[in-house]
Image (tube, grey):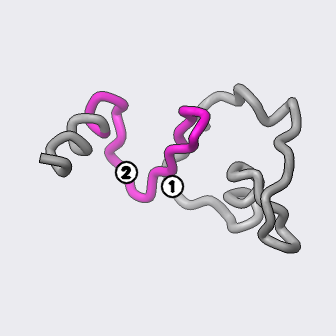
Amino acid sequence: MLVDTTLDLLKKNGIIVTPTYIFSNGLFHSKLLKMHERQRRLGLSAETGKIKKMEADDVGKKRE
C-alpha cells in the first residue's frame, strides 16, 4: 500500500526522473545535486554537517 501511495504522489507531481529530491519546504529538484548544494538546501553546514539556520533568500525558491 505504501508503495502505491508513493507512486501516486510521484505521478501527481510529474516526477519521472531519479534521483529527485523532495525537500521539507515542498520544493523538488530532479537530477543530481552536488554535495555542498544538497547540504545547503537541507540547512547543513558544508564544513561540519551540522544544521544551520536557513537564510531568508533560501525560502520559497522555485523548482529548478
Q: Quadrant of residue 35?
A: bottom right
Q: Nearer the viewer, residue 32 or 10?
A: 10
Report which residue position mark 1 lands on.
31
Residue type at tag 2? Val
Residue 1: percent from the left, percent from the top?
A: 11, 46
Secondary structure type for disc 2? loop
Give the residue displayed 54% in from the left and 32% down from the top: 26
Rounded to the nearest angstrom, the CA distance separating label 2 from label 1 is 7 Å
Q: Nearer the viewer, residue 1 or 34?
A: 1
Report which residue position mark 2 lands on.
17
Q: Is residue 62 left or right of residue 9?
A: right
Q: Nearer the viewer, residue 38 or 51?
A: 51
* SS assignment for the magenta stretch, majority: loop
Give the residue displayed 57% in from the left and 43% down from the top: 23
Name the N-terminal-most of marks 2 and 1.
2
The quadrant of the rendering that contains the C terminus is: top right
Q: Quadrant of residue 10?
A: top left
Disc 2 crowd rating (10 Å Cα; few below 14, some 14-19, many 20+) is few
Give the residue displayed 22% in from the left and 43% down from the top: 7
Residue type at tag 1? Lys
What range is drawn magenta here? 10-28
Specify whether residue 33 is painted magenta: no
Residue 6: percent from the left, percent from the top?
A: 26, 44
Q: Are marks 2 and 1 in contact (CB under 8 Å)?
A: yes
Q: Quadrant of residue 46?
A: bottom right
